[in-house]
Image: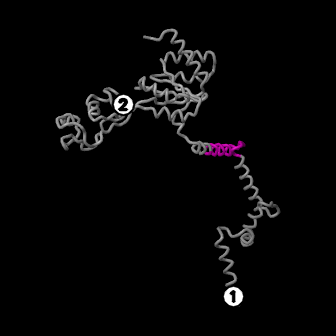
Amino acid sequence: MGLSRERKQEYFEKMEELLETYAKIFIVSCDNVGSKQFQQIRIALRGQAVVLMGKNTMMRKVINQYLAKNPGHPYEVLLERIRGNVGFVFTNGDLGAVRQCIEENRVPAPARVGAVAPIPVVVPPGPTDCDPGQTNFFQTLQIATKIVKGKIEIVSAVNLLEPGQRVGNSEAVLLEKLGIKPFDYGLVITEVYDNGSIFDVKVLDLSEDDLAIKFATAMATFASLSLGIGYPTLAAVPHSVANAYKALVAVAVECDTFSFEKADPFKLALSDPEAFAAKYGAVGGGGGGGAAAEAAPAEEKKEE
Protein backbone atom coordinates (compact mmCIF):
# COMPACT_ATOMS: atom_id res chain seq x y z
CA MET A 1 0.00 0.00 0.00
CA GLY A 2 1.43 3.35 -1.07
CA LEU A 3 1.65 6.55 0.92
CA SER A 4 -1.34 8.83 1.15
CA ARG A 5 -1.28 12.19 -0.59
CA GLU A 6 -0.79 13.96 2.76
CA ARG A 7 2.19 11.74 3.67
CA LYS A 8 3.76 12.28 0.26
CA GLN A 9 3.36 16.04 0.63
CA GLU A 10 5.01 15.89 4.05
CA TYR A 11 7.90 13.90 2.56
CA PHE A 12 8.34 16.38 -0.32
CA GLU A 13 8.41 19.32 2.07
CA LYS A 14 10.85 17.59 4.42
CA MET A 15 13.31 16.64 1.67
CA GLU A 16 13.13 20.10 0.07
CA GLU A 17 13.85 21.66 3.47
CA LEU A 18 16.87 19.36 3.88
CA LEU A 19 18.15 20.31 0.42
CA GLU A 20 17.88 23.97 1.39
CA THR A 21 19.46 23.57 4.83
CA TYR A 22 22.42 21.28 4.21
CA ALA A 23 25.35 21.57 1.81
CA LYS A 24 26.97 18.15 2.38
CA ILE A 25 25.40 14.79 1.58
CA PHE A 26 26.56 11.21 1.98
CA ILE A 27 25.06 8.92 -0.68
CA VAL A 28 24.59 5.58 1.08
CA SER A 29 23.56 2.06 0.14
CA CYS A 30 21.32 0.38 2.71
CA ASP A 31 21.03 -3.27 1.67
CA ASN A 32 20.12 -5.65 4.52
CA VAL A 33 19.61 -2.81 7.01
CA GLY A 34 16.55 -3.28 9.20
CA SER A 35 14.23 -0.70 10.71
CA LYS A 36 15.67 -1.17 14.22
CA GLN A 37 19.18 -0.59 12.94
CA PHE A 38 18.00 2.54 11.10
CA GLN A 39 16.61 3.82 14.38
CA GLN A 40 19.96 3.21 16.13
CA ILE A 41 21.84 5.02 13.34
CA ARG A 42 19.49 8.01 13.52
CA ILE A 43 19.96 8.21 17.29
CA ALA A 44 23.76 8.03 16.93
CA LEU A 45 23.75 10.82 14.30
CA ARG A 46 21.36 13.08 16.19
CA GLY A 47 22.75 16.60 16.27
CA GLN A 48 25.30 15.82 13.53
CA ALA A 49 23.34 14.60 10.53
CA VAL A 50 19.88 13.61 9.23
CA VAL A 51 19.17 10.29 7.47
CA LEU A 52 16.61 10.36 4.67
CA MET A 53 15.30 7.28 2.88
CA GLY A 54 12.47 6.95 0.40
CA LYS A 55 11.31 5.63 -2.94
CA ASN A 56 13.64 6.54 -5.77
CA THR A 57 10.83 8.03 -7.82
CA MET A 58 9.83 10.34 -4.97
CA MET A 59 13.42 11.43 -4.33
CA ARG A 60 13.95 12.20 -8.02
CA LYS A 61 10.69 14.15 -8.15
CA VAL A 62 11.69 16.35 -5.21
CA ILE A 63 15.11 17.08 -6.74
CA ASN A 64 13.54 17.85 -10.14
CA GLN A 65 11.11 20.26 -8.49
CA TYR A 66 14.00 21.89 -6.60
CA LEU A 67 15.98 22.26 -9.85
CA ALA A 68 12.94 23.84 -11.53
CA LYS A 69 12.96 26.50 -8.81
CA ASN A 70 16.77 26.80 -8.85
CA PRO A 71 18.00 26.28 -12.45
CA GLY A 72 21.62 25.22 -12.79
CA HIS A 73 21.96 24.08 -9.18
CA PRO A 74 24.63 21.37 -8.72
CA TYR A 75 22.08 19.04 -7.08
CA GLU A 76 21.50 17.84 -10.63
CA VAL A 77 24.43 15.41 -10.22
CA LEU A 78 22.43 13.54 -7.57
CA LEU A 79 19.73 12.41 -10.01
CA GLU A 80 21.81 9.82 -11.81
CA ARG A 81 22.96 8.35 -8.48
CA ILE A 82 19.49 7.54 -7.19
CA ARG A 83 19.52 3.91 -8.24
CA GLY A 84 18.95 0.78 -6.22
CA ASN A 85 18.49 0.80 -2.47
CA VAL A 86 20.04 4.20 -1.71
CA GLY A 87 19.48 7.05 0.70
CA PHE A 88 20.95 10.39 1.75
CA VAL A 89 22.65 11.48 4.96
CA PHE A 90 22.55 15.29 5.20
CA THR A 91 25.06 17.23 7.31
CA ASN A 92 26.82 20.56 7.68
CA GLY A 93 29.36 19.19 10.14
CA ASP A 94 32.72 17.48 9.80
CA LEU A 95 32.52 14.82 7.10
CA GLY A 96 35.13 12.63 8.77
CA ALA A 97 33.29 12.54 12.11
CA VAL A 98 29.93 11.75 10.50
CA ARG A 99 31.51 9.05 8.35
CA GLN A 100 33.08 7.43 11.40
CA CYS A 101 29.74 7.41 13.19
CA ILE A 102 28.02 5.77 10.19
CA GLU A 103 30.69 3.09 9.81
CA GLU A 104 30.69 2.26 13.52
CA ASN A 105 26.98 1.40 13.48
CA ARG A 106 27.13 -2.04 11.92
CA VAL A 107 25.30 -5.14 13.14
CA PRO A 108 26.62 -8.75 12.92
CA ALA A 109 24.33 -10.97 10.87
CA PRO A 110 24.10 -14.68 10.09
CA ALA A 111 24.66 -16.03 6.59
CA ARG A 112 21.21 -16.47 5.04
CA VAL A 113 20.56 -18.81 2.13
CA GLY A 114 20.85 -16.94 -1.18
CA ALA A 115 22.77 -13.98 0.27
CA VAL A 116 25.90 -12.86 -1.57
CA ALA A 117 29.06 -13.03 0.53
CA PRO A 118 30.69 -9.57 0.67
CA ILE A 119 33.84 -10.96 2.29
CA PRO A 120 35.64 -14.32 2.41
CA VAL A 121 34.23 -16.65 5.06
CA VAL A 122 36.71 -18.94 6.82
CA VAL A 123 35.74 -21.54 9.41
CA PRO A 124 38.54 -21.68 12.00
CA PRO A 125 39.96 -24.97 13.31
CA GLY A 126 39.12 -26.09 16.81
CA PRO A 127 36.45 -27.79 18.91
CA THR A 128 32.72 -27.44 18.26
CA ASP A 129 29.58 -28.19 20.25
CA CYS A 130 28.49 -30.83 17.72
CA ASP A 131 28.18 -34.43 18.86
CA PRO A 132 29.79 -37.34 16.93
CA GLY A 133 26.42 -38.18 15.36
CA GLN A 134 26.80 -35.15 13.03
CA THR A 135 30.07 -36.33 11.49
CA ASN A 136 28.38 -37.20 8.20
CA PHE A 137 27.27 -33.58 7.78
CA PHE A 138 30.90 -32.38 7.96
CA GLN A 139 32.03 -35.15 5.61
CA THR A 140 29.45 -34.01 3.04
CA LEU A 141 31.06 -30.57 3.07
CA GLN A 142 34.53 -32.22 2.82
CA ILE A 143 35.62 -30.81 6.17
CA ALA A 144 38.25 -32.88 7.99
CA THR A 145 37.26 -33.56 11.59
CA LYS A 146 38.15 -35.74 14.58
CA ILE A 147 36.42 -36.71 17.80
CA VAL A 148 37.87 -35.19 20.97
CA LYS A 149 36.19 -35.69 24.36
CA GLY A 150 32.89 -36.65 22.78
CA LYS A 151 32.76 -33.56 20.51
CA ILE A 152 33.61 -32.94 16.86
CA GLU A 153 36.76 -30.91 16.32
CA ILE A 154 37.65 -29.28 13.00
CA VAL A 155 41.21 -30.18 12.07
CA SER A 156 42.19 -27.24 9.86
CA ALA A 157 40.78 -23.91 8.65
CA VAL A 158 38.18 -24.19 5.88
CA ASN A 159 37.64 -21.57 3.16
CA LEU A 160 33.87 -21.82 3.06
CA LEU A 161 32.84 -18.85 0.90
CA GLU A 162 34.56 -16.41 -1.44
CA PRO A 163 33.46 -12.80 -2.03
CA GLY A 164 30.58 -12.67 -4.53
CA GLN A 165 29.60 -16.31 -3.92
CA ARG A 166 26.02 -17.04 -2.89
CA VAL A 167 25.39 -18.75 0.42
CA GLY A 168 24.01 -22.26 -0.06
CA ASN A 169 21.81 -24.24 2.33
CA SER A 170 24.69 -26.39 3.61
CA GLU A 171 26.93 -23.38 4.29
CA ALA A 172 24.13 -21.54 6.12
CA VAL A 173 23.34 -24.59 8.30
CA LEU A 174 27.02 -25.15 9.13
CA LEU A 175 27.60 -21.55 10.17
CA GLU A 176 24.45 -21.62 12.29
CA LYS A 177 25.58 -24.83 14.01
CA LEU A 178 28.93 -23.25 14.80
CA GLY A 179 27.35 -20.00 15.98
CA ILE A 180 29.29 -17.95 13.44
CA LYS A 181 27.85 -14.66 12.16
CA PRO A 182 30.27 -13.90 9.34
CA PHE A 183 28.69 -10.75 7.94
CA ASP A 184 27.90 -7.34 9.35
CA TYR A 185 25.50 -4.88 7.78
CA GLY A 186 25.06 -1.13 7.93
CA LEU A 187 24.93 1.94 5.74
CA VAL A 188 27.64 1.80 3.07
CA ILE A 189 28.86 5.19 1.86
CA THR A 190 29.35 5.16 -1.91
CA GLU A 191 29.95 8.84 -2.71
CA VAL A 192 30.06 12.24 -1.03
CA TYR A 193 28.49 15.51 -2.20
CA ASP A 194 30.08 18.68 -0.82
CA ASN A 195 28.98 22.16 -1.99
CA GLY A 196 28.58 21.18 -5.63
CA SER A 197 31.46 18.68 -5.82
CA ILE A 198 30.94 14.93 -5.75
CA PHE A 199 33.75 12.51 -4.98
CA ASP A 200 34.57 9.02 -3.75
CA VAL A 201 34.46 8.45 -0.01
CA LYS A 202 38.14 7.36 -0.09
CA VAL A 203 39.07 11.02 -0.52
CA LEU A 204 38.21 11.50 3.17
CA ASP A 205 41.11 9.18 4.05
CA LEU A 206 43.60 11.80 2.84
CA SER A 207 45.33 13.72 5.63
CA GLU A 208 46.54 17.32 5.47
CA ASP A 209 50.09 16.03 4.88
CA ASP A 210 48.90 13.96 1.91
CA LEU A 211 47.16 16.99 0.44
CA ALA A 212 50.28 19.13 0.95
CA ILE A 213 52.45 16.57 -0.86
CA LYS A 214 50.01 16.30 -3.76
CA PHE A 215 49.78 20.09 -3.99
CA ALA A 216 53.58 20.46 -4.02
CA THR A 217 53.86 17.81 -6.75
CA ALA A 218 51.22 19.54 -8.84
CA MET A 219 52.92 22.93 -8.43
CA ALA A 220 56.27 21.45 -9.48
CA THR A 221 54.68 19.96 -12.60
CA PHE A 222 52.93 23.25 -13.36
CA ALA A 223 56.19 25.19 -12.95
CA SER A 224 58.00 22.78 -15.27
CA LEU A 225 55.30 23.20 -17.90
CA SER A 226 55.46 27.00 -17.59
CA LEU A 227 59.25 27.00 -18.01
CA GLY A 228 59.05 24.57 -20.91
CA ILE A 229 56.68 26.71 -22.98
CA GLY A 230 58.20 30.02 -21.85
CA TYR A 231 55.00 31.28 -20.24
CA PRO A 232 55.59 33.19 -16.97
CA THR A 233 53.49 32.16 -13.96
CA LEU A 234 53.78 32.67 -10.19
CA ALA A 235 54.79 29.02 -9.76
CA ALA A 236 57.69 29.44 -12.20
CA VAL A 237 58.96 32.82 -10.91
CA PRO A 238 61.46 31.37 -8.34
CA HIS A 239 62.89 29.06 -11.00
CA SER A 240 63.08 31.87 -13.55
CA VAL A 241 64.95 34.11 -11.09
CA ALA A 242 67.36 31.27 -10.23
CA ASN A 243 68.01 30.53 -13.91
CA ALA A 244 68.56 34.23 -14.64
CA TYR A 245 71.03 34.44 -11.74
CA LYS A 246 72.96 31.43 -13.08
CA ALA A 247 73.10 33.02 -16.53
CA LEU A 248 74.45 36.30 -15.11
CA VAL A 249 77.10 34.47 -13.09
CA ALA A 250 78.16 32.55 -16.21
CA VAL A 251 78.51 35.82 -18.14
CA ALA A 252 80.50 37.43 -15.32
CA VAL A 253 82.86 34.46 -15.04
CA GLU A 254 83.66 34.60 -18.76
CA CYS A 255 83.99 38.39 -18.86
CA ASP A 256 87.14 40.02 -17.40
CA THR A 257 85.72 43.55 -17.44
CA PHE A 258 82.35 42.84 -15.85
CA SER A 259 81.37 41.46 -12.47
CA PHE A 260 78.99 41.99 -9.56
CA GLU A 261 79.13 41.21 -5.88
CA LYS A 262 77.37 37.82 -5.96
CA ALA A 263 79.55 36.64 -8.87
CA ASP A 264 82.91 37.54 -7.28
CA PRO A 265 83.21 34.31 -5.20
CA PHE A 266 82.70 32.17 -8.33
CA LYS A 267 85.32 34.14 -10.33
CA LEU A 268 87.78 33.90 -7.45
CA ALA A 269 87.25 30.15 -7.08
CA LEU A 270 88.08 29.61 -10.76
CA SER A 271 90.99 32.07 -11.02
CA ASP A 272 92.71 31.48 -7.65
CA PRO A 273 91.39 28.47 -5.67
CA GLU A 274 93.89 29.02 -2.82
CA ALA A 275 92.77 32.60 -2.30
CA PHE A 276 89.15 31.44 -2.43
CA ALA A 277 89.87 28.79 0.23
CA ALA A 278 91.63 31.30 2.42
CA LYS A 279 88.81 33.81 2.16
CA TYR A 280 85.74 31.56 2.22
CA GLY A 281 87.08 28.39 3.83
CA ALA A 282 88.02 25.05 2.29
CA VAL A 283 85.27 23.37 0.30
CA GLY A 284 84.04 20.15 1.90
CA GLY A 285 84.17 20.82 5.67
CA GLY A 286 86.32 21.79 8.56
CA GLY A 287 88.74 18.82 8.69
CA GLY A 288 90.81 19.61 5.60
CA GLY A 289 91.65 23.28 6.40
CA GLY A 290 92.91 22.50 9.89
CA ALA A 291 95.13 19.69 8.66
CA ALA A 292 96.73 21.93 6.01
CA ALA A 293 97.39 24.67 8.56
CA GLU A 294 99.14 22.23 10.92
CA ALA A 295 101.25 20.74 8.13
CA ALA A 296 102.79 24.10 7.08
CA PRO A 297 104.61 24.89 10.43
CA ALA A 298 105.90 21.32 10.59
CA GLU A 299 107.62 21.68 7.20
CA GLU A 300 109.21 25.01 8.25
CA LYS A 301 110.79 23.38 11.34
CA LYS A 302 112.35 20.60 9.24
CA GLU A 303 113.97 23.16 6.91
CA GLU A 304 115.54 25.00 9.85
Quarter of the rendering occupied by the N terminus: top left
Q: Where in the figure is residue 302, as x and y percent of width and height?
A: 67, 88
Residue nearest the observer in this picture, 214 or 70: 70
Q: Does the magenta run of residues contain 234?
A: yes
Q: Residue furthest right?
A: 257
Tell me if 161 is positioned left or right of 58 in this view. left
Q: Residue at x 47, y 34 (%)?
A: 103
SS state under label 2: strand
Q: Which region of the structure is painted magenta? A: 216-236
Q: Residue furthest top?
A: 5
Q: Nearer the viewer, mark 1 or mark 2?
A: 2
Q: Residue at x 31, y 27 (%)?
A: 113
Label 1 crowd (10 A; few <14 / some 14-19 / many >=20): few
Q: Residue at x 63, y 18 (%)?
A: 71
Decide which of tag 1 and tag 2 comes sooner along the chain: 2
Mark 2: amino acid = Ala
**Relative to residue 137, is residue 257 depicted above or below?**
below
**Relative to residue 179, is residue 274 depicted above or below?**
below
Q: Residue furthest left?
A: 133
Mark 1: amino acid = Lys
Tell me if 235 is positioned left or right of 6 in this view. right
Quarter of the rendering occupied by the C terminus: bottom right
**Magenta stretch: helix, strand or loop mostly:** helix
Q: Which mark is residue 109?
A: 2
Say which quarter of the image contains residue 278.
bottom right
Residue nearest the observer in this picture, 162 or 16: 16
Q: Where in the figure is residue 204, as x and y percent of width and height?
A: 54, 37
Residue under circle 1?
Answer: 301
Tell me if 95 is positioned left or right of 261 in this view. left
Q: Where in the figure is residue 73, as x and y percent of width and height?
A: 62, 22
Say which quarter of the image contains residue 228.
top right
Alpha-carbon span between mark 1 and mark 2: 93 Å
